[in-house]
């Protein structure tokens, strides 16, 4: 066992997180898998409420496999990166039909499932079955990069290969579940991206970046790109005599895939008029609502909502106050304001 692993395991006994809602004795692999997917690109504090809500609706893998996609997306709405929810649903169906409803315990079978990469597969096997499988999520990358002063950014295949080598090197053969949780906890609570709490870190006495006072240098940052591109669209909010709003389901791929949204078009008079006529030739603009920005990872989206009177509208019109469909965050924002 390496020095890093021993230090982490000692620290974990009294400092590790042991009461998260997906932690249990014995481990519940369904809960672990769900939490690991939710925790991709998302912090624990945000995930907890979504996890509890999701489990209340889909208490086990069979319930998730048998659910309708709209139900799944509705309970995921707001958490972002919606392909994760679609892949969860796909995986549940695959496990139900090809693995007799039992989540597989072989690495090759797990990593072949939709939305599960090498690190997530390692976490599921380690936390769920106590197997000695390494992980390399964002917290672990940062911790190992500082500890070993790894040169270069994660976007480099050479850097990633070195980090995987180090992850495997430090992963112990015993107490693996505790080690895996410990190194994730260290990264999340102490070895933070900014202002790491090195004074509280059990690895500080052997951490290269800490010893050389270069915590702000490691891990190396990626070369900054130009300012994020911007795009502007119009949301046409068709409303009928009953004050219901029209929503349509978006394609499975692309942003907000599988969620329900307003009619969308370019922000120019010709495109707006055409979209209105195609939906309802009797519809008329009531007013424009306040323009606002929604930020994605790689671009900023400016949204111009326009309220449209649509007499006679029936199909796919919904009461906004009791809506049970999954909607993107900007749509939910507009509905709440209405």
Image (cartoon, helix red, strand yellow):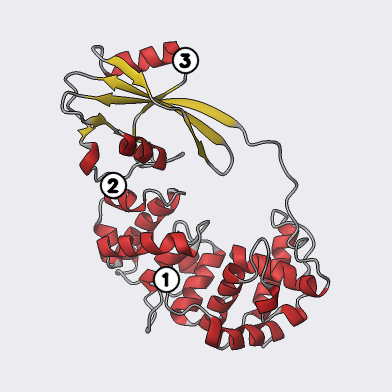
> Could you say where residue 77 lies in the image, as x and y percent from the top left?
36, 48
Q: Earlier in the sequence, mark 1 or mark 3?
A: 1
Provide the residue designation for mark 3. 268
Q: Is residue 314 left or right of residue 186?
A: left
Q: Is residue 103 something that shows in the picture?
A: no
Please tell me how crowded label 3 is: few (under 14), some (14-19), or many (20+) other residues with Cα within 10 Å: few
> Could you say where residue 228 lies in the image, as x and y percent from the top left?
63, 36
The N terminus, quarter of image = bottom right
> Could you say where residue 335 lies in the image, as x and y percent from the top left?
31, 36
Provide the residue designation for mark 1. 32
Residue at 20%, 24% (x, y): give it: 240
Please tell me how crowded label 2 is: few (under 14), some (14-19), or many (20+) other residues with Cα within 10 Å: some
- Place residue 8 in its image quadrant: bottom right
Residue at 27%, 64% (x, y): give it: 56
In three-dimensional space, the C-alpha distance between marks 2 and 3, rounded to whole angstroms, equals 32 Å
Provide the residue designation for mark 2. 70
Q: Is residue 132 left or right of residue 199?
A: left
The answer to whether marks 2 and 1 mark residues whose Cβ atoms lie closer than 8 Å is: no
In three-dimensional space, the C-alpha distance between marks 2 and 1, rounded to whole angstroms, equals 23 Å
Task: Examine the rendered structure and indicate whether residue 14 appears above or below residue 133.
Answer: below
Q: Nearer the viewer, mark 1 or mark 3?
A: 3
- Place residue 134 in its image quadrant: bottom right
Residue at 77%, 58% (x, y): give it: 152
Q: Earlier in the sequence, mark 2 or mark 3?
A: 2
């Amino acid at each position: 066992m390496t020095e890093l692993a021993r230090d982490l395991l000692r620290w974990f006994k009294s400092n590790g997180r042991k009461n998260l809602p997906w932690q249990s004795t014995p481990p519940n692999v369904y809960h672990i898998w769900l939490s690991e997917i939710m925790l991709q690109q998302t912090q624990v504090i945000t995930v907890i409420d979504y996890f509890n809500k999701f489990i209340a609706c889909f208490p086990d893998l069979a319930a998730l496999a048998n659910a309708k996609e709209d139900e799944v997306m509705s309970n995921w709405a707001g958490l972002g990166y919606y392909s994760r929810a679609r892949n969860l649903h796909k995986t549940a169906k695959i496990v139900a039909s090809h693995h007799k409803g039992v989540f597989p315990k072989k690495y090759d079978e797990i990593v072949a499932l939709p939305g599960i990469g090498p690190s997530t597969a390692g976490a599921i096997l380690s936390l769920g079955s106590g197997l000695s499988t390494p992980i390399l999520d964002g917290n672990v990358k940062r911790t190992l990069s500082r500890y070993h002063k790894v040169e270069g950014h994660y976007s480099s295949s050479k850097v990633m290969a070195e980090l995987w080598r180090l992850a495997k090197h430090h992963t112990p053969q015993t107490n693996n579940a505790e080690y895996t949780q410990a190194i994730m906890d260290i990264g999340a609570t102490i070895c933070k991206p900014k202002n790491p709490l090195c004074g509280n870190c059990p690895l500080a006495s052997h951490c290269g970046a800490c010893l050389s006072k270069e915590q702000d240098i490691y891990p190396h940052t990626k070369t900054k790109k130009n300012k994020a591109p911007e795009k502007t669209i119009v949301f046409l909010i068709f409303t009928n005599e009953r004050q219901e709003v029209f929503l349509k389901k978006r394609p499975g791929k692309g942003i907000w895939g599988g969620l329900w949204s307003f009619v969308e078009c370019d922000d120019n008079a010709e495109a707006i008029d055409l979209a209105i006529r195609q939906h309802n030739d009797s519809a008329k603009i009531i007013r424009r609502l306040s323009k606002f920005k929604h930020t994605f990872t790689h671009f900023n989206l400016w949204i111009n909502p326009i309220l449209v009177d649509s007499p006679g509208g029936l199909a796919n019109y919904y009461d906004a106050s009791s809506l049970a469909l999954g909607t993107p965050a900007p749509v939910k924002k507009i509905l709440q304001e209405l």
